[in-house]
Each structure stands twice: as C-alpha cells, then as structure tokens.
Amino acid sequence: MGVNSEEALFLENETFCEEVSDNSETERKPLEFISSGNLEIDKKLEGGVPIGSLCLLEGAKDSGKSVFMQQIICGALNQDKKVLALTTEKTSRKLLNNMESLKQDISDYFIIGRLRIFEINASYVEESPELSNNLLGRMLECVNDCEEELILIDSLTILAVSASENTLLNFFRECLKLCDKEKTILISVHGYAFSQEVLYRLRSVCDSCLELRIEQVGDKLIKTMEIQKLRGAKKTTGNMLSFDVNSEYGLKIIPVSKVKA
C-alpha cells in the first residue's frame, strides 16, 4: 500500500524526533565532583565542587574564602588530580605554611609537581586599567595552556577594581569556555570590588556561586557559607553552613543548634 505525502512527512518527523531523543540520552553524563575532604561541606554541596564548572567564591576579608579554597586543594590532591593555584595575596611558602598549620600538609605534592603555585604581584596595577586588562589576558593564557584539572585564583579583587567591566566579564566568559575542557575553576573575590550590576552579571555567568560572610550571633562572630547557586543541584539552593577555623583542628563545621545557643 502506498504512502501519501502527508504520511511520509509525519513518519520522517517521527524518525527525526526519535534520533534526537536517543542522542540526548547518550550525551547525558552523571556529574563528577572534587571533594572538599570535609563530609559536612560535601553534603551541603551535594557531593563537592562539580568537575568542569566555574565557581565564584564571594566574601569579605577574613570570611574564610582562602581557607575554603585550601580545603578544595587538599581534596583534589587526595583524588590524584593536578592543581594550579594563582595567588595575588600570598607567596608559595606562606600558602604551604598556612595549609600545614591547618593540618593539611601538601608540601610533598608541591615538590613532585602535582601542585603548582604561581605568585602574581599585582600591587602595581591598582591605578592602571590597561595593566589590569593585560594581566587578566595573561592569566587566561596560563589557564588555557596548563595541564592541571583544577585551577584556583585567590583572589581576583585587586585586578577587578581597576579592570574595565567588559574585560572582566569577558574573562569570566572565557573561563567558562575552558570549563568545557574538563577544567574546574574557582575564583575568589571581595564583593566590594564590583558594582551590584556587574556582580549580578558575574553570578549569572558562573555555574556555581558561594557567598561567605562573618556574622554575629549573640556575642559570637561566626563564619557562614551560603550556596546561592550550584550546578546540577537537586535541592533548592540557599543552603547554609557555619564553620570555624582553628590551628588545632583546621576547618570545623559548627552545628546550627550550637550557633544559636
């Protein structure tokens, strides 16, 4: 029995839909994570920092941004990943000493080359947008050419203050493209470095956004982390946790009941 033109068109479209559906199913991959090495933090992050994501870590001075990044460095190294840390705030020695004081001695990984630390002296760019723009471009080249799976930038504040908005937004967009190559990029910033409009746009570009704050509860000052946005999250974002940092035990989660007591 022959098939008329309308039936032929319907069958052709149906076959096309089946092919698209099949392809979309095969392309779906379960998310993989870089563990923080802390079970409570990983639980809040639903597994850790998603591999292949761009994560913005925002917070005031001494709110725990660097400590959180150091936690991720330790977790990644324990997962046999290679790590590159670009720092504008610390020397290599100071970073290693800080981690050792928090019971996270990673000097062996540094010696064998699994961890590389690049010190960026950006103190001279504060009054020169052109130098800031150029340095952001060089950092992009470094991230693109490196073989490390995890790249951390701590912090971008000193460059963000003087760089043009277009250059800054382009930097984040290009970082997002590099995440398609299975690179995971964490960038820490101080919120004051941006106008509210630019900060909203940066958050929209990033896959994940974590905000760290220092809050007063009663007569106590505590550090809190709020998950504003998380790639692949199954739960409603906005989960919060409180923590403390101590040389005796490193980073320690504070139960909410204890915080409110």
Image (cartoon, rainbow, N blue to C red):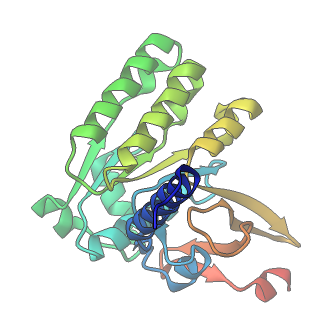
Q: Position of residue 231 (x, y in %)?
A: 56, 62
Quadrant for the C terminus in the image: bottom right
Q: Position of residue 251 (x, y in %)?
A: 52, 75
Is residue 62 visible from the viewing direction of this image?
A: yes
Q: Position of residue 219 (x, y in %)?
A: 85, 71
- Figure quadrant of residue 97: bottom left
Q: Position of residue 89 (x, y in %)?
A: 44, 42
Which residue corresponds to the image point at 25% horizontal and 66% vertical from the top-left? 81
- Figure quadrant of residue 34: bottom left
- Figure quadrant of residue 86: top left
Which residue corresponds to the image point at 70% horizontal and 67% vertical from the top-left? 224
177 relative to 149, above or below: above
- The extreme right residue here reads 218
Which residue corresponds to the image point at 59% horizontal and 25% vertical from the top-left? 161
| In this picture, residue 194 sits left or right of residue 184 | right
Which residue corresponds to the image point at 45% horizontal and 11% vertical from the top-left? 130
190 relative to 9, above or below: above
Number of marks in picture: 0
Is residue 163 visible from the viewing direction of this image?
A: no
180 relative to 69, above or below: above
Q: State the residue in front, 146 or 36.
A: 146
- The extreme left residue here reads 112
| In this picture, residue 114 sits left or right of residue 95 | left
Q: State the residue in front, 93 or 143.
A: 143
